Image (cartoon, grey):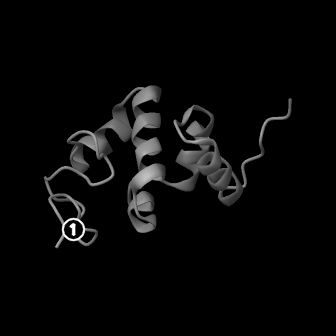
Amino acid sequence: MQGPGRSRDNIERTDSLYFFPDQRVTAEEARQLLRQGTADQRAWVISHLLRYAQWDDIWSFVSREEVKEVFPTLDLPENLRSAWGRMLKIEAPVG
């Protein structure tokens, strides 16, 4: 049995989302930050999505183009950044 906020089938619950393990963020709050937040807030939400969310859940919040736009500012470990960069076909900076 999953805890609060962990239902893939019902991600719009008012419970905290499972991909924010260190604080309570609802789906509505995450969507608001993605729509109207600062660049840093958007990068924070997207970083959590790419680190902790299941595949289908990621794309229910953001598009690939939205991820590409903020990719350089995402807080990701290097191995995960490389993997996402390959998947999204993002060229690594040279130099």
Q: Is residue 39 left or right of residue 30?
A: right
Along the viewing direction, whichever of 63 and 55 lies nearer the viewer: 55
Vertical order, 92 against 52 (above or below): above
The kind of residue on which mark 1 rests is: Asn
Along the viewing direction, whichever of 33 and 44 lies nearer the viewer: 44
Within the image, what quadrant is residue 4 found in? bottom left
Q: Residue 54, how many percent across, how many down?
A: 41, 64
- What is the total number of numbered labels drawn onto the structure image? 1
Q: Is residue 52 left or right of residue 3?
A: right
Q: Residue 82, how many percent across, how many down?
A: 68, 49
Q: Residue 7, how many percent across, how many down?
A: 23, 67
Residue at 43% from the left image edge and 58% from the top image edge? 58
Residue at 45% from the left image edge and 27% from the top image edge? 40
Q: Residue 50, how many percent across, how many down?
A: 48, 51
Q: Circle 1: is it few (<14), some (14-19), or many (20+) Cα within 10 Å? A: few
| Residue farthest to the right, as pictured | 95
Quadrant in the picture for the N terminus: bottom left
Residue at 33% from the left image edge and 52% from the top image edge? 19
Residue at 13% from the left image edge and 53% from the top image edge? 14
Secondary structure state at the residue bearing disc 1: loop
Within the image, what quadrant is residue 46 found in? top left
Q: Is residue 76 left or right of residue 88?
A: left
Within the image, what quadrant is residue 36 found in? top left
Quadrant in the picture for the C terminus: top right
Vertical order, 61 against 40 (above or below): below
Q: Which residue is the site of mark 1?
A: 10
Vertical order, 95 against 71 (above or below): above
